[in-house]
Amino acid sequence: MSGAPLTLLLFARMATTECTWLEGGLHVDAVAAGTDTTFDVLQDLGVGYLERILPRFVMHAPLAEFASALRRVPGMVKPLVVTSSDGRLTLTATEAARRTSDPGLSITELETSALLMPPTPGFAFAPPGLGAAAKKKP
């Protein structure tokens, strides 16, 4: 296990009042690229405009590793909302959510251990509360 899912905690922190330099909402795309995952970190300026706030980067860990961590500890990225489609995870927080979310993130040692567990073979990520119809995009 690479520990790569711990990167998601950074994005969760950026989605709170702690990140004062971010003006809009937060939009993070994680896209499978073979055995790697490519990340795009953007701010949502509204009306469909996204602005890159960090350079695109690649982590040498499969997307399944991130998805598995989110399944085991679903609250780790609050206040971000997670959606998924084939080969992609998207984490978003509106500007309003960011400006009202305290950075009171508290991940226990047990939850950290759960984040570092190997991905389940054949695992398909489905965020809590989303039915099968919500997972498919038109």
Image (cartoon, helix red, strand yellow):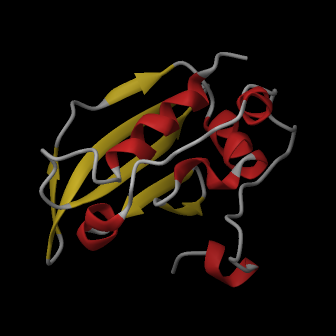
Q: Quadrant of residue 118?
A: top right
- What x and y, as percent, mark residue 125? 71, 55
Identify which residue, 3 or 95, lies in the foreground: 95
In terms of image quadrants, where is residue 24? Answer: bottom left
Q: On the rendered image, what quadrant is the N terminus found in?
A: top right
Q: Looking at the rendering, which quadrant does residue 110 occupy? A: top right
How far across and how far down the image is residue 87, in percent?
58, 49
Q: Height in image: 63 above or below 74?
A: above
In depth, the one of 7 and 123 nearer the eye is 7
Percent of width and height locating residue 100: 32, 67
> Which residue is drawn at the image coordinates 16% and 49% (left, top)?
22
Q: How many marks?
A: 0
Residue drawn 17% across and 41% down? 53
Closer to the camera in the image, 93 or 119: 93
Identify the residue at image location x=48%, y=48%.
104
Residue that appears at 74% across and 78% down: 132
Left or right: residue 80 compared with residue 125: left
Q: Eyeballing the image, is 15 above or below 115?
A: below
Left or right, residue 18 beside residue 120: left
